[in-house]
Amino acid sequence: MTESFSIPPEQHGQNAWELSRFREKIAAVKAAEQKTIHLRDVNTQDLSEEDAHIYGLFENDALDISVFETYRDKIQDDGSRADFAAYLANMIMIKDFKKYLSPKESPGREG
């Protein structure tokens, strides 16, 4: 059984992304990346504080993969939110791949 995701009480109100700013940001990304399949059908008004919280953790390099997986499992059948989670999963992979390629961030890797 998958455990339920929720914003930890001690982190309420600590998110760098307020819901309205978060929705505006994702709408701008959606408009700029019209070919991004995961955002094509996203209605930003359907995105929640949980989505904004996860995005804030991602933006601040503080998103633990187990937290993301719990969140993703919780919203997997939730239309726009599930599509947003798929987009974010891609962004996580891209960010990790860039870190892997960066000699500054990969000890022992020659550039």
Image (cartoon, rainbow, N blue to C red):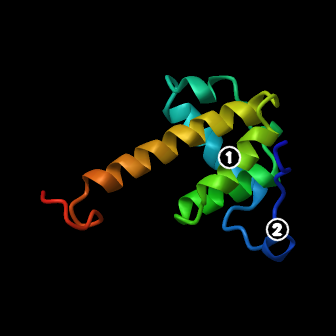
At which x and y percent is residue 33?
Answer: 49, 31
At which x and y percent is residue 30?
Answer: 58, 34
Instruction: Tell me, yes or no, whether the two marked residues, 2 and 1, touch with CB atoms within 8 Å.
Output: no
**Residue toward you, 52 or 63:** 63
At which x and y percent is residue 69?
Answer: 68, 46
Q: In this figure, which residue is indicated by the disc labeled 2?
A: 8
Residue located at (75% from left, 31% from top): 80
Q: In this figure, which residue is indicated by the disc labeled 1?
A: 69
Which type of secondary structure does the marked residue at label 2 adopt? Answer: loop
**Residue toward you, 110 or 104:** 110
Quarter of the N terminus within the rendering: top right
Residue type beneath disc 2: Pro
Mark closer to the chain start, 2 or 1 = 2
| Total numbered labels | 2
Residue type beneath disc 1: Glu
Above or below — where is 74 with respect to 101? Answer: above
Residue located at (49% from left, 22% from top): 35
Q: What is the spatial separation of the Cα atoms under label 2 and label 1, in whole angstroms?
A: 15 Å
Residue located at (34% from left, 56% from top): 99
Residue 85 visible within the image: yes
